[in-house]
Image (spheres, rainbow, N blue to C red):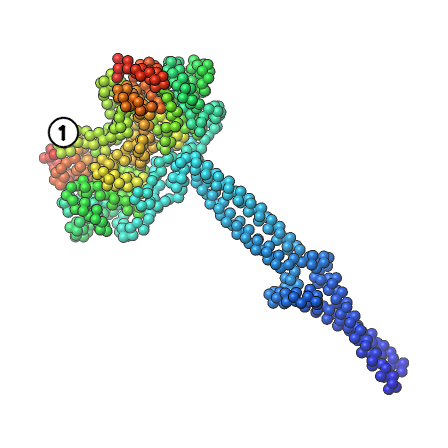
Amino acid sequence: MAVRKEKVQPFRECGIAIAVLVGIFIGCVCTILIPNDFVNFRSSKVASASCESPERVKMFKAEFAIISEKNGELRKQVSDLTEKVRLAEQKEVIKAGPFGTVTGLQTNPTVAPDESANPRLAKLLEKVAVNKEIIVVLANNNVKPMLEVQIASVKRVGIQNYLVVPLDDSLESFCKSNEVAYYKRDPDNAIDVVGKSRRSSDVSGLKFRVLREFLQLGYGVLLSDVDIVFLQNPFGHLYRDSDVESMSDGHDNNTAYGFNDVFDDPTMTRSRTVYTNRIWVFNSGFFYLRPTLPSIELLDRVTDTLSKSGGWDQAVFNQHLFYPSHPGYTGLYASKRVMDVYEFMNSRVLFKTVRKDEEMKKLKPVIIHMNYHSDKLERMQAAVEFYVNGKQDALDRFRDGS
Amino acid sequence: MAGRRDRSQQLRGSRIAIAILIGIFIGCVCAVLFPYGFFNSSSSLKASEHLSKSSNQVGSSACESPERVKMLKSDFVTLSEKNAELKKQVRELTEKLRLAEQGSDNARKQVLALGTQIKAGPFGTVKSLRTNPTILPDESINPRLAKILEEIAVDKEVIVALANANVKAMLEVQIASIKRVGITNYLVVALDDYIENLCKENDVAYYKRDPDKDVDTVGKTGGNHAVSGLKFRVLREFLQLGYGVLLSDVDIVFLQNPFSHLYRDSDVESMSDGHDNHTAYGFNDVFDEPAMGWARYAHTMRIWVFNSGFFYLRPTIPSIELLDRVADRLSKAKVWDQAVFNEELFYPSHPEYTALHASKRVMDMYEFMNSKVLFKTVRKNHELKKKVKPVIVHVNYHPDKLNRMQAVVEFYVNGKQDALDSFPDGSE
């Protein structure tokens, strides 16, 4: 029995070893035949052929990313160019309608406000302005009495948006003591010297430099000389459909609004009469500017012309407004409107026509500008007496001219 | 003994099965740990890396599936195609933009001005819009005219002359000068059958309007001014079709091609009735009123009128509105067309009136010469006679037009130096 037991034990150990080897062999066979796992029966390709190397895949991905990036760039470029082309072609977007329906662009768009042009002024205007509009007056000590009359009329009428630009210290103190909004400019040698001048035409030319900042800030500006009496709020009488609205130096419908002035040249015999367009000038002492590019260009052009060749600011102002383009010159093309001659009255109309006509004396002007007379202060006071205090003979003692 | 043998056999079978299973298990473990085989030692390192990077995707991350690679490839191809497409689009748009900008040297300004609200730049840099955009052509309003214009117009511009039998002789002189100069974009609007035949015989492009009672009556029998007023109705269609129109009266001699001397930066470019720099281009005409004393001198803006017998209109909204306004006023009152033309061009807005605000340019008065300048100034000045070579001469100041037109041709074309001498400054 002992011998039999020994024989059986060696046989068992040998059998187990063989079994293990058989198992391993089968596993290897499975690995070779089904490299992607038992569950995946679809794959029948050999391992090397069916498997891309990681390097190659990485390369694909990198190229993919580059192409995507480039695509994004090109897409952006396309949208930019599409926009540019659209804008360039916008010029052809309008068809002309039938007779009687065509109206051109008459009211220019305003500029985007640029507060960086003058933050201090911007802050001041936010307080003083009404509907982004303001009356601006430039004054120095030489015109103080007239300014007093004007300020009194402004307060009487109840105008809130009125601002004085004092050109010297005396005026600055005067504004403080009279509770009038004022804006003291930063020192500027060129302006300061002229500002103190006694010559009114020199001082008058400064306004074109001063007003630019107001327009850049997006405000509509009504420039007023000091020899103007306010009887109503002018902002209730503006059209605001042009770059420039101005009172005229004209004295009737023809001279104020424009007319055909026939020129006679006898040497031309049968063609001796020739037609001309004529209009009395816009008064550069009372005008309203909308904050548009043409308005700003107007100010720049006048400033530039005055600084180079001098001249009277009112003449230069009108040349740029009225002269068309011609060889060597490109016109401005600001749209223009003349204010009503009886609402925005000049002193010639008042003293030569209105005061002598019973019907016309009943008119109620918005402002009166003593531009045609040298004794301005007395006439301003008389206008107040007549229109405010109702003194019927207040204007009678004055002559037509002066 | 028999019982013992049975037990021993059963135990053996079971053990063998277990052993086989253990073997298979070990094989699987080896497959997972060494996917590239036992002998490739470098690949085992990579396998380790993969294992550490993405242990959750043991099988799939090591080996990209063919489907995924195929997908990547097709995406790649798609993107490349799209890329090429976008590049092409960029090229096309760039070209389109260039052409659009070429169309007018003021196109950039237009783009800026017509775009969003912009800030004003510093002093000296602000330029407002001067050149209005042109309208979109509308061929439906007159397909017949559109077809004619397509044939004869040059750069979408054309000279238009209105004529009836009364001005036949002058028209012949004009046509001769047109041909001599080599102008091909010239069109006669025939107001009667006689002129229509004349154009046929002389190989001149012409356009016979569709019958219209009002126009036809005036066209046949009307005087100078009445016929002249018709042009404001006729020209509208030309502008609506998108063409720039140079209107020419028949009393004009062409010596050069006028289209080489236009600026095209305004709605209206016109010759002037003025006779010097002041009267032609504008000046401050001081009005004296002694009664006003200190302010006796009133300043006024004055300019001689634009001549409504020779002007160029760009196809813009203001130009068309100008024609409409003038035509409307002429239909209501018996007034001179040139006077109305100038009133609409020059008068600013005022109470009860809104101005047109068309941009205006005066043509050079020596290039586009009126007959006063020629006979009163130029012919008497040796320098001017030599140097000045007019583009056109308009015999607008003189009633003996035909004779003076012929003399102009003799002088400027045939070089006959005394051709102008027999005429007085004015007229008899």
Q: Is residue B301 visible?
A: yes
The subunit letter for the residue under badge 1 reads: B
**In the rendered image, the vertical position of residue B175 relative to residue A357, given as above or below:** above
- Residue at 39%, 14% (x, y): give it: B168
Total count of labels? 1
Q: Choose between B244 and B358: the one closer to the eye.
A: B244
- Residue at 35%, 36% (x, y): give it: B130
**Residue A333 location, x and y as percent?**
32, 35
**Residue B138 location, x and y as percent?**
46, 30
- Residue at 59%, 56% (x, y): give it: A59
SS at badge 1:
helix
Mark 1 highlights which residue? B290
Q: Quadrant of the N terminus of chain A?
A: bottom right
**Residue B45 location, x and y as percent?**
63, 67
Q: Quadrant of residue B177?
A: top left
Identified by mark 1, the residue type is Pro
Q: Report the residue that reaches farthest toward the bottom.
A: A2
